[in-house]
Image (tube, coloured by chain):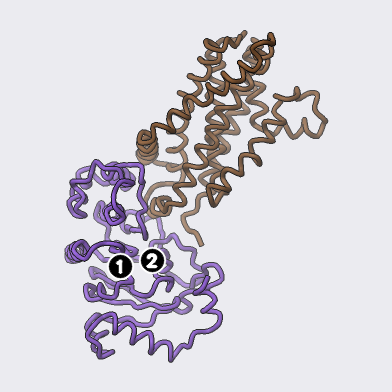
Chain colours: A brown, B purple
Amino acid sequence: MNPRRMFATAGRVFGQLRHDPRSIALMLVAPSLLVGLFAWLFADQDGVFDRFGGAILALFPFIVMFLITSITTLRERRSGTLERLMTTPLGKADFILGYALAFGLMAILQAVITVAFAVYVCGLTVDGPLWQLGAVAVLDAVLGTALGLLASAFAQTEFQAVQFMPVLVFPQIILGGLFMPRDQMPDVLYAISDWLPLSHAIDAIQAVTNGDEGWDVGAPLLIVAAFAVGCLVLAPLTLRRRTP
Amino acid sequence: MVRRGRRTLFDGLDVSIPHGEITGLLGPSGCGKTTLLRAIVGVQKVKGGTVTVLGQPAGSRGLRERVAYGTQGAAVYGDLTVRQNLQYFASVLGVPRGDVDRVLDEVGLRDHAKQQVADLSGGQAGRVSLGAALLGSPELVVLDEPTVGLDPVLRSELWGMFRRIADAGTTLIVSSHVMDEARRCDRLLLMRDGRLIADTTPEALLEDTGEDDAEDAFLALIARDEREHPPTRRSQRGAAS
């Protein structure tokens, strides 16, 4: 890994984003709008938004970042620029981490905006400290970025990349504990859900909104971070300098 | 030997490319030019045989600063400006930033440096891609159809530039399907259907075939090759896919 090349790549990804203000707007504002819609839906029912609002905070940044990352890196594979880069001294890890850095920073901005919107505009009550909620949201968005980077390796077209949503993301949402508390699930599904990163992301958010402290928040957070790091370690391994 | 899909290419291809010269790789589209170039820059999976570039196996780590590859079509970022593209590739290669200005002048895009590549014409975008391959001082520059879609004036300018680069000691391998460009090369490799049908010089090609035009000479060679290697059903199927 070479920091200069990694930062150059991150800078280049930012440069590309800068020329696409609409994408930036969508990335930063879309999750807030969805949270707002969700809050409005339960406006007449006391306490429902407080119970589920947190989990939604884990969900939307994760999905948005997953989609954006997998499509952008796929575009790079398809346009021939990746092949060109693979003939240069750029390391595979420089490439992946450059992307992760650029989109990770976007994820931080997005998480801050979304959490602020949920709490100050939609009135989400959070028993724990607010910064913790922000930290969890950031980590979830980074997880989406890392998973998107990994997933894009297995897609050959944009169409396939979008199809990874129902395959990789939706099961995590269904089993994540949003529709049914995880401890009430059938044993097999509970065991599966334990291996899905989004379950732990939602656990972490709910721990913060419930005002839990210490290990109750820390443990799921660590697991999410481990999944994100794992994806980032695996992603460069899927890049090939030589292709058929 | 290379397998691409169901086709086997370059079965028994053996060629060496001299230093400091322009080697033209010519042949109809689909004949395997790109695959051969990809093998030379080390991004093509090779089934058998060896490709040695500047004394090292193709694609070795040590070659990544010494070999530059200009892909077919513009392999640059459409949503960046011309200068941003070149600056990125320069920093990946570890080339000083000042080199970007030199390259901008070389490919005649100085006036377009601040424009987004997506807003440029196809020919201009191709020159940005070419510029990226000229950054730094590679010892071997491999260009896949760099002049495709360019007007005659620009084409001639680019060939003038290739000559300057070669005169300075760089080895160039340039593919093209425009036979007229054969005359600009020092050495010619003519390909057809995944096979090398001639390894010659422009003068020898014309002399050998008795034609005075590179295109006719190439067609004559193809006709001769067709008599010697009648197309098999397998190769026809490959060509159609």
Q: Position of residue A98 (x, y in %)?
A: 42, 38
Q: Position of residue B97 (x, y in %)?
A: 23, 42
Identify the residue at image location x=62%, y=8%: A127
Identify the residue at image location x=39%, y=35%: A20
Identify the residue at image location x=21%, y=47%: B99
- Host chain of mark 1: B
Q: Earlier in the sequence, mark 2 or mark 1?
A: 2
Q: Which mark is residue B37?
A: 2
- Amino acid on which disc 1 is placed: Ile
Question: Disc 2, disc 1: CB below 8 Å?
Answer: yes
The span from disc 2 to disc 1 (Cα, nearest Å) is 8 Å
- Which of these two is toward me, A97 or B66? A97
Q: Residues within 10 Å of mark 2 (few under 14, many from 20)?
A: many
Q: Which mark is residue A1?
A: none
Q: Position of residue A70 (x, y in %)?
A: 52, 41
Identify the residue at image location x=38%, y=68%: B52
- Host chain of mark 2: B
- Which of these two is toward me, B235 or A85? B235
Whether residue A11 is visible to the viewer of this picture, yes or no, is no
SS for tag 2?
helix
- Amino acid on which disc 2 is placed: Leu
**Where is mark 1, residue-wise?**
B173
